[in-house]
Image (spheres, rainbow, N blue to C red):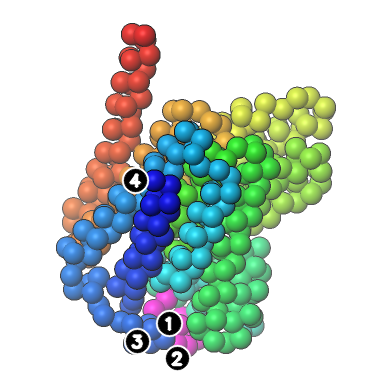
Amino acid sequence: MKKILFIGYSVTLVALTIFSYAFIDQHLLYYASFYSGFAFINRLTTTALYCFFIVLLFIFYFLFIRLLKQKKLSVKDIKVLIGMTCLLLLFSYPAMLSYDIFNYIATAKVLFFYHENPFVIMPIAFLGDPLLAFTHAANKVALYGPVWIVLTGVPYLLGGGNFFLTLMSFKILVVLFYLLTLFVLWQFTKNPSTILLFGLNPLVVLETLTSNHNDIVMMFFTLFAFLLIKQKKYLFAFCFFVLSILIKYATIFLLPVFLFTLWQSYRQKTIDWKKSFFFSTLAMLAIFFLSPLREELYPWYAIWFLPFAFLTEKKILLYFSIAMSFGLLLRYIPFMYLGTYFGPTPLIRIVVTGIPLFIAGLLLLFQHKLLKKR
């Protein structure tokens, strides 16, 4: 059974990687030989296939959780699954669901190639640059913090001006931070369940290993800062927490929880880490739900609260996190099918996000009533 699941999961990831190339932009000349326009011409088929892959990934996710509960899945097995996921999705097309990675490259180029300040100069200022043809945020200054901009210098310079090498270097950078985040989570709990719940969560997998969003980098610095508090390395903890804020700013909402946890540890008091993680979850949920005030509720923003939610080991947060992950991935469906962000798209997004949460709520209520009867 386990072997069949592993093979089925790996085949699914390979198929998903191939499917991702259906979304290649016609203006992306570097991938001209792979362009088919399939995702934009056959919207119904594309949407159906996307739904199929999402459902399949969640089925495997639940089956792996079940195997772990039955003690039929070892830590070594989880490592194999995570390694397999990283390796196979490393070759996926990163702009299947979002064009952010191209924005990362364009912003890095402003600083490291044109030697201009990306917080002042937009990529669109450099007319004739080939990146402008497919970069969707070329008319904006740097959207992220200075620490992220500096970090992007590593993959950009490693790419040596070659687009394919640069793109792969950016993907590898995100994969490394994904693995580092899992390592920090393991240091906190030594619980394989936490690693599996976060590391193989389909939303985390798709938004980190396929779309390569930098949110995982921000969360690594944050979690590592908390780990340093646990190790009583307070100065380093504070420095890493500041670094996390200077990646994408969202973790500034964690400042009260972080400072209180640091103060508790410094005063030699026993820290209730699960309580600390619970309040961290609430803090990151607050900024998550407030994000539409700035722009919109992007699915990858869930990476802000998911690691803390799984660290709490609270059943209600577990159900909520998994249901929310599923609902957020469904938010891509209306645009994928209709090809517009207007019309019924906003309403459909709200509905498809809410349905899994409603079902999860019913399941929790049913379980509670069942336990009461017993």
Q: Residue furthest top?
A: 373
Q: On the image, numbered disc 1 is attached to which residue?
A: 132
Q: CA distance from mark 4 to mark 2?
A: 46 Å
Q: Which residue is mark 2?
A: 128
Check if mark 2's residue and mark 3's residue have beta carbons within 8 Å: no
Residue at 65% x, 68% y: name it: 151
Task: Give the CA distance from mark 2 to mark 1.
Answer: 8 Å
Q: Secondary structure at mark 1?
A: helix
- Residue placed under numbered mark 3 in the picture: 32
Judged left or right of residue 48, residue 66 is right
Q: Is residue 179 above or below residue 157?
A: above
Q: Position of residue 199 (x, y in %)?
A: 52, 49
Quick check: can you spot residue 141?
no
Residue 104, image x, y percentages: 52, 71
Instruction: Name the one closer to the observer, 242 or 80.
Output: 80
Mark 3, Cα crowd under 10 Å, few <14 / some 14-19 / many 20+, is few
Of labels 4 and 2, earlier in sequence is 4
- Tell me the mark number nearer the camera, choosing from 1 and 3: 3
**x, y percent for residue 76:** 58, 49
Lateral position of residue 366 relative to residue 127, left or right: left
Is the Cβ of the residue at disc 2 closer than 8 Å to that at disc 1?
Answer: yes
- Quadrant including the C terminus: top left
Q: Is residue 281 left or right of residue 351?
A: right
Q: Which residue is mark 4?
A: 59
In the image, the segment drawn in magenta is: 124-135
Question: Judging from the image, what secondary structure is the residue with disc 3 in?
Answer: helix
